[in-house]
Amino acid sequence: MSVTLPKGGNAPLRSGRCGVTIVAPGAAIDVCAVLLSQDGKVRNDDDLVFYNHPAQDGVVLSGRTIAADLHAVPAAVERIAIVASIDPALPGAHFSADNSPQVVIECLGEQFGFDPPPFTHRETAAVLVEIYRREGAWKVRAVGQGWDTGLRGLATDFGVVVDDADSAPQTLTPSSAVSSVPASAMSLEKIQRAAPGLVNLYKAAHVSLAKSGIIGQRAAVYLVLDHSASMGRFYRDGTMQHLAEQALGLSANLDDDGTVPLVFFSGGVDLVADIRLDNYRGRIDHLHRSLGWGGTRYAPAMQSVIDHYQASGSSDPAFVIFQTDGEPSDRKDTRELIRRASALPIFWQFVGFGLSRDLRFLRSLDTLDRRTVDNAGHFAAGQRPTGRSDADLYDRLMKEFPDWLSAARMRGVIL
């Protein structure tokens, strides 16, 4: 049962792994945590946990969720402040009665909620809740205190030294944290040397990962491509080649091997191959020309990905871009496979090409029952997918992945 906390209210927490998730309808927000000592200040700049420094002393940021392993938090940390912020440099961007953030706290089967009173003084950052020690036990308090100076101003008040040379108000670089900031799996310099044609895609993907709060996250990226009879025009006009290059640009941020495994499917698995930094040019056209056109069955392709991932022995999760332009003939098998796979460290991001009415099955996967965690997302890319910007595609790919990472960690699906 969920307990709703009033502003200033508090409740005891069971000591263990707790998650704090922030929801802000209609607002593009950043979430962070600040580890505070007895004097209400950070011990050093590493105590700001944000998208460029997503883990510190048992506190981990993933998307809009802060996970705290309370057993691992050092004794010197008295409080963990959970913060939401909007970049004050964006025109008209501030919290209001329409977009004030809401909080859900989950801790070992207990759930608490907090809906702060609306922020009405153009606040751009707010401490929403804090997890704190009291007489040797952990408690949560509903705070709801706002700042009109953004995350930079709030962080400074807590004693974080912010690099004033940085022109972006929300792109914080704590001075003592620079050496420990997690980086993309492959450096920009390596991409410039190995695949200069992918530099812009690599950069666009990096920005989306940063906005999602998962810079430094590692994952194996897979690409599954529909080769049913209706897909011909997307291969002929270069759409499929471009999607493969977009997947490779994302993979270079998440994985260090420069390779994306490929699965072509129709009525079954047509081909398993890969696309790499050193062979990507014209790769999709070269591979698909030898394949026949067929029907549409998802389950064989999904099982192929699962088999490949398990055989790889990877300790990182997998992010699967599963492209299709129609509903499968094996709906029941697909649903059952998604259910079984929900206990695996694999997230399925379905990307629908073509008419929205042909993709109703993908929408149904968002509400599929009997799963360990919600392990599938989808979006409709339309009839001209290449008309979308690379930034838009990456933002849509990352829409549900951070939430899955948090839920999968909470359920023990991933470490």
Image: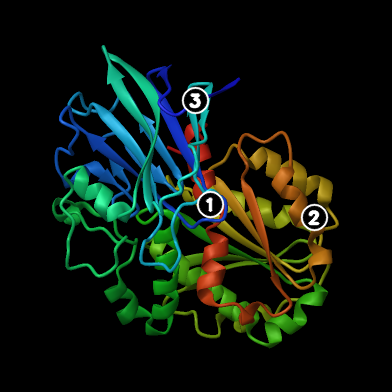
Q: Hey, what amino acid is under mark 1?
A: Phe
Which of the marked residues, 2 or 1, is nearer the chain's N terminus?
Answer: 2
The residue nearer to you, when weighing 411 against 301, is 411
- The structure residue drawn at horizontal position 67% and vertical position 62%, both measured from the top left corner, is 379
Q: Toward the viewer: 150 or 134?
A: 150
Estimate the spatial distance between the alpha carbons at disc 2 and disc 1, rounded to whole Å. Answer: 20 Å
Element at label 1:
helix
Q: Amino acid at mark 2?
A: Phe
Question: Mark 3: which amino acid?
Answer: Leu
Residue 169 image offset from top left, x and y in percent:
29, 63
Does residue 251 appear left or right of residue 319 in this picture? left
Q: Nearer the viewer, mark 3 or mark 1?
A: 3
Tell me which residue sits at (77%, 66%) in the image: 266
Mark-to-mark CA distance, 3 and 1: 29 Å
Q: Is residue 388 above or below residue 153?
A: below
Classify mark 3: residues with Cα within 10 Å, few (<14), some (14-19) or many (20+).
some
Q: How many marks?
A: 3
Q: Is residue 243 visible?
A: yes
Residue that badge 2 annotates: 361
Q: Are marks 2 and 1 in contact (CB under 8 Å)?
A: no
Q: Secondary structure at mark 3?
A: loop
Q: Nearer the viewer, mark 3 or mark 2?
A: 3
Q: Quadrant of the N terminus?
A: top right
Which residue is tagged 1? 401
